[in-house]
Image (tube, rainbow, N blue to C red):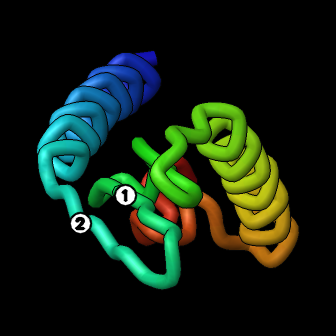
């Protein structure tokens, strides 16, 4: 029972650290411009701004970010299927 409590505490701590890391990554920004296109992304791999021929394209930003979330979900599933996931990355902590 105490192992489960300890594991829960460790997971909460890791979640907190992951959220802090995401906040830090979101502060990193990079903009690329080419041929009438402009895109700004952050270190959390999210598109935060897109412009086509001087026109802001929030619809394009949303579409790209939705596609990225779906790909990330599929990648997470594949990692779990292959025995990875958090337990694989953490050296089998839960086992």
Q: Are marks 1 and 2 in contact (CB under 8 Å)?
A: yes
> Quadrant location of residue 16?
top left
Q: How many numbered badges does the structure rendering display?
A: 2
* x then y, percent, for residue 86: 53, 56
Residue situated in front as seen by the camera: 89 or 48: 48
Q: Which residue is mark 2?
A: 30
Q: Which residue is mark 1?
A: 41
Q: What secondary structure is found at the residue carrying circle 2?
A: strand
Q: Residues within 10 Å of mark 1 (few under 14, many from 20)?
A: some
Reply above or below: 65 against 33: above
**Residue 83 in the figure: left or right of residue 6:** right
Residues 88 and 58: in front is 58
For the question of whether residue 89 can be seen, the reply is yes
The x, y position of residue 62, in whole percent, is 66, 36
Q: Residue at position x 83%, y 69% from top? A: 78
Q: Which mark is residue 93?
A: none
Tell me the CA gap for discs 1 and 2: 6 Å
Q: Quadrant of the C terminus?
A: bottom right
Q: Nearer the viewer, residue 76 or 32?
A: 32
* Residue placed furthest toward the bottom: 34
2 in relation to 55, above or below: above
Q: Is residue 51 above or below residue 14?
A: below
Which residue is depicted at the point 33% across and 32% down? 15
Neighbours of disc 2 within 10 Å: few (<14), some (14-19), many (20+) = few
Task: Residue at 57%, 57% (x, y): give it.
Answer: 52
Residue drawn at point x = 41 percent, y = 43 percent: 48
């Amino acid at each position: 029972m105490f192992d489960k409590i300890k594991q829960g505490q460790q997971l909460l701590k890791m979640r907190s650290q992951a959220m802090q890391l995401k906040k830090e990554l979101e502060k990193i920004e990079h903009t690329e411009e080419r041929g009438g296109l402009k895109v700004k992304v952050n270190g959390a791999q999210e598109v935060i701004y897109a412009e086509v021929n001087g026109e802001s394209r929030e619809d394009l930003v949303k579409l790209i970010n939705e596609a990225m979330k779906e790909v990330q979900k599929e990648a997470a599933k594949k990692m779990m299927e292959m025995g990875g996931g958090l337990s694989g990355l953490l050296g089998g902590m839960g086992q």
